[in-house]
Image (tube, grey):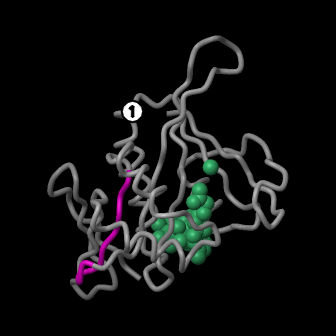
Amino acid sequence: MSRTMGTEKDTRTNYFNIFNDNKPIVVRRCSLEDLEGVIEVNEKELPEDYPYFFYKSILDNYPESFQVACNSNGKIIGYIMWRVERSPAISSLKLMNKGHLVSIAVLKSYRRVGIAATLLSNSMKKLKKYKIDKFVLEVRVSNYLAIKLYKKFNFTTHNIKERYYRDGENAYYMTLKA
Ligand code: ACO
Ligand code: ZN
């Protein structure tokens, strides 16, 4: 399948065509009206569900890095959201800003054409506005596709968090220097 990455129309939007049929997928900042669609994608694609106010507070606090992908009908087909955490560095008293990847998902029928990679790279650029020292995330040890995606972005496994998920599965804690 060929993929044509478009040029950036402005700093907020990325257009690119997939499936060779001239129907653009748009990646842009999330708005309040998008939250319903974001929650729908999350509920279809991930076992971790969050209440509406959780999404809303991420949007209120970290709007720059909350991004969505939409199809030509404007339907939300993917999203990414981050939060910023301040915590002391292990080896000093200095406070570190961590960009914590809360969640990313793409609807099944739109996978494998670079949407997650676009969401990640765009949002990571935006996150730098929040003066991030490093990017961090947890991922199920069985989630081969997501782990491969993160490794492609040079994340490395820092440690394993035992029984991190409610069903008892372990997580890899992966980090990347900003
Ligand atoms: N097979 C092999 N590698 C894959 C696959 C696959 N099916 N899908 C993604 N990858 C890896 C590859 O390295 C790929 O790069 P390449 O195409 O150059 O080989 C890279 O990811 C980027 O692929 P994209 O097409 O951008 O990824 P996609 O849009 O398909 O979305 C995602 C990937 C988000 C992991 C998707 O599979 C998904 O929504 N899964 C369910 C939700 C999920 O697991 N989210 C992550 C949970 S962890 C967290 O949120 C912190
Ligand atoms: Zn986390």
Q: Residue at x 54, y 34 (%)?
A: 85
Q: Pick the quarter of the image with the N terminus.
A: bottom left
Vertical placement of 140 versus 130: above or below?
A: below
> Is residue 132 one of those drawn in magenta?
no
Q: Quick check: 66 left or right of 41?
A: left
Q: x, y (%) of residue 14? A: 25, 61
Q: Residue at x 79, y 48 (%)?
A: 161
Q: Nearer the viewer, residue 63 or 123?
A: 63
Q: x, y (%) of residue 41? A: 47, 75
Q: Amino acid at mark 1?
A: Tyr
Q: Nearer the viewer, residue 20 or 119?
A: 119
Q: Nearer the viewer, residue 5 or 71?
A: 71
Q: Nearer the viewer, residue 37 or 114?
A: 37
Q: Residue at x 22, y 58 (%)?
A: 13
Q: Which residues are magenta?
A: 66-74
Q: How many marks?
A: 1
Vertical placement of 38 versus 153: above or below?
A: below
Q: x, y (%) of residue 111? A: 48, 77
Residue furthest top in the image? 93
Label 1: state its secondary structure. helix
Q: Residues within 10 Å of mark 1 (few under 14, many from 20)?
A: some
> Is residue 71 one of those drawn in magenta?
yes
Q: Quadrant of residue 148?
A: bottom right
Q: x, y (%) of residue 106? A: 47, 73
Vertical placement of 36 versus 59: above or below?
A: below
According to the picture, the residue beneath numbered tag 1 turns out to be: 130
Residue furthest left in the image? 9
Query: Does the Cβ of the disc 1 residue fall within 8 Å of ligand 2?
Result: no
Ligand 1 - quadrant of the structure image: bottom right
Q: Quadrant of residue 115?
A: bottom left
